[in-house]
Amino acid sequence: MLHLKQDHSEFVVLSVLAEGPSYGYAISKEIAARSEGAFKLSASAMYPLLTKLEKQGLVTTSWEEIKAQGADPDSSGRKRKWYTLSTKGTKRLAQHIETQRRVVKILSAFAPDALAGGVGMP
Amino acid sequence: MLHLKQDHSEFVVLSVLAEGPSYGYAISKEIAARSEGAFKLSASAMYPLLTKLEKQGLVTTSWEEIKAQGADPDSSGRKRKWYTLSTKGTKRLAQHIETQRRVVKILSAFAPDALAGGVGMP
DNA sequence: TTCAGATATATCAGGTTTCGATATATCAAC
DNA sequence: GTTGATATATCGAAACCTGATATATCTGAA
């Protein structure tokens, strides 16, 4: 299982948010699901990262109160913080994709036999 | 220009050493050359990394005295530290290549249109 | 009904890594 | 002689990741 870091984390989170708003816990699960368990973004890495994205204006946020079925209307319930990709975030994602392409292409120059044909080939 | 970090740095350095022994400064230049200037591994990242590789037994080292043409035979001259890939290092490089393949493959699941076909395609 | 496990967010200390600056010293070329 | 390239290395500041910890709620099985 590969622990995501820095660039990959940001790319993957923005990528998930590109399909619609989501929140920390769900993003974490989505990453594990889409990577078939190969990628892991831990909670202690996730939340600081989301805060950073918010500060940079790549996402906007809003809180949701989660009421249980038949719960006391006055009870506070659980809270859920939704993250929505901003225009700036969309642009950043495009940059990440372009960078990733470049990196993969150049890395293949350091291991031609092994990496060439490694992606998108039949 | 992309600054290499952690995993990529190690992979690229081992990859260069796989073609024969080399030394810090030359490795740095080789990386810049092979990536057409796109990758940069700074000296302050290079030397700690090489020391780490040595401690892990992935490379073996030896010092060379560089004498200038017609220089005083007693002068100390410059020193050059050669790094040679060990058997363990060769195995590690193979692991890196395999990991890199996996990562690229899985990342493409997060940006299918953009990354699929990005490497090794006509 | 009780209790474990999942949901949900967040912070902290500790360790690693990276960057930019700095240091030292030799060599080649002009 | 003086600039720029060669060559290795360390330092402090900053950024980052991990594992642990904290808090609190909801769901489902025993």
Image (tube, coloured by chain):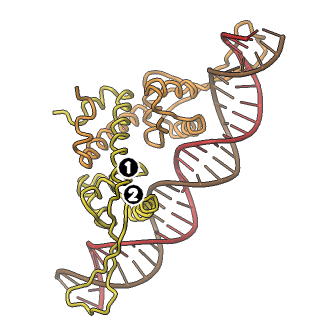
Chain colours: A orange, B yellow, C brown, D red
Q: Which residue is mark 1?
A: B92
Relative depth, front residue between A101 and B27: B27
User: Percent position (x, y) of residue A28?
Assistant: 53, 28
Left or right, B103 with respect to B38, comes to right
Helix, strand or loop status at disc 2: loop
Relative depth, front residue between A29 and D13: A29
Chain under callout 2: B
Where A76 sits versus A45, above or below?
A: above
Q: Which mark is residue A12?
A: none
Chain under callout 1: B
Within 10 Å of disc 2 (Cα), the crowding (few <14, some 14-19, many 20+) is many
Snapshot quadrant of residue B62: bottom left
Snapshot quadrant of residue A102: top left
- Could you tell me which residue is drawn at 36 percent across and 38 percent down? A95
Q: Earlier in the sequence, mark 1 or mark 2?
A: 2
Q: Which residue is mark 2?
A: B58
Q: Amino acid at mark 2?
A: Leu
